[in-house]
Image: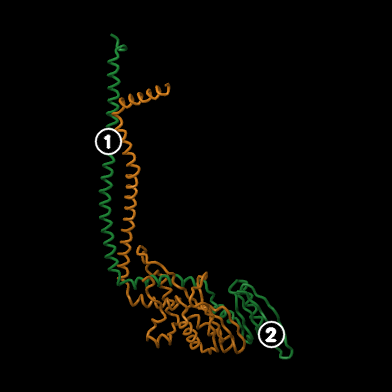
Chain colours: A orange, B green
Amino acid sequence: MDNLAREHIDINTLRVLYARYKGFIAPFLAIVVVVILFVKITIPSIQDLLKGYEEQKVGIQTLENLRGKLNFVKSLDNSNITSQFNLVNKALPIIKDFDGVLSAISDSSNKSGVAIGGFKFLVGSLSKEEDGNEYPTLNVSLSVIGGVEAVDKFIGSLAKALPLSEITKVSSQKDNSTVAIDFYYKPLKKSKYDESLPINQISNDGLKLIEELSTFNIPQSPISDSVSGNDSVSTPSANPFF
Amino acid sequence: MSNEINLLIKKDKNLLKEQSKLKVFRLIAIGSLLTILLISLSIFLLNQKLSNSSLKVEKDRESVLVEMKPFFEKESKIIIVNNRIDNITKVLKKRMDVYKILNTILGKIADGILIETLEFSEKKISMNITSYSLIPIDVFFNDLIEMAKRKEIVKSLTLESLDASSLTGSYKISIDMNI
């Protein structure tokens, strides 16, 4: 009986409270709804809006870069950039340039008047890229007919020939010598075309280097000449992205 | 009659107080509703404006890309040229100019000295030289010692052997250099 009475009292209390505060219920619910809307919808919307503005800013920057690129590329002299492209690719090919290496050896031999006995390529993998080596090389070991002076002449001539090379070993006797040479190459890294990146003009140091390289012997390959009549065979595809 | 025992007046006062509280509460509720409405409307309008301008930027980007298409090859060439210049510079800095080294050392060989053998590998040069006189050998040695002192190409110099042949009257010398 006591429990029942207590329940009646509670219900009565609630009734009294409801009657007293019923006017507050609707505004209270409205405020609760507003708070929920603000937290769940308005704040994320504001964040989205700000993100949208940021993205638009990036988009405008990209557009400006693209316009800058377009104007810059339009202003480039095609024949000039092509010759620079061919020259730097002769100096540091993107692949193992056997043709270029043979031409450099043959040309250096002719220019120095030193006869080459024979040579051996240490090629390595033809299909895989050389891992872990920042500047891979194509190793050639050749025998030079002659002593120290002949080797010196030959090396001197090779030092001014493209592709770039480095002498790693010399073994010279009276009439016969052996020279080991590393011919450098550097594969291009695969990259995705990023239109937001600006193109840099060739720096002054870069232009000086190109000028210096143009004084090097650029052996004309008999192989590519016979194939196409120009030197475009040994140069890589101009477009690594498309 | 005292107000304190007048229950009716007290009740009215409380009622008025509560009614004013309710009024304020309603005002806050309506105000917050209006505010959220206003904010939502502003966000909507700003979003509209943003999407319109983004659309224009995107259209412009596409038209510039179309305009650029014939120049992609040129663009790639300049990118590759810059890449090659960067790498060539590094290679030139890294590589050892063996021609210069050998040329400098061979330039110090005085008349009357014959180079029998010369070995170069791994930053080390070994030479066997022959001469019929000790004078040119002495000149050559002094030059190399000077170079080693100045750390010019030669970092250290070792005389491995000096043989005198009474049969031929020649001196045979073997030297090692670290470069």
* Chain ID at mark 1: B
Query: Considering the image in quadrants, where does the N terminus of chain A appear?
Result: top left
Residue, far top: B1
* Local SS, label 2: strand
Q: Are marks 2 and 1 in contact (CB under 8 Å)?
A: no
**Image side of residue A107 versus residue B41, left or right:** right
Check the image and report above or below for A223 versus B148: below
Check the image and report above or below for A150 versus B154: below
Do the residues at pointers 2 and 1 share their chain? yes
Q: For the residue carrying disc 1, how many other residues have a C-alpha within 10 Å: few (<14), some (14-19), or many (20+)?
A: few
Q: Nearer the viewer, mark 2 or mark 1?
A: 1
Towards the viewer: A164 or B13: B13
What's the amino acid at mark 2? Answer: Lys
Name which quarter of the figure residue B83 lies in.
bottom left
Check the image and report above or below for B160 versus A202: below
Q: Tell me the residue that label 1 is attached to.
A: B31
Towards the viewer: B133 or B68: B68
Numbered label attached to residue A172? none
What's the amino acid at mark 1? Answer: Gly
Q: CA distance from mark 2 to mark 1?
A: 108 Å
Tally of marks: 2
User: How far across and down, in percent of the image, does residue B11 sit?
Assistant: 29, 18
Q: Tell me the residue that label 2 is attached to.
A: B172
Q: Residue placed at 25% from the left, 48% from the top? A: B45
Towards the viewer: A9 or A60: A9
* Local SS, label 1: helix
Which tag, 2 or 1, sits closer to the chain's start?
A: 1
User: How far across and down, in percent of the image, does residue A226 sit?
Assistant: 40, 88
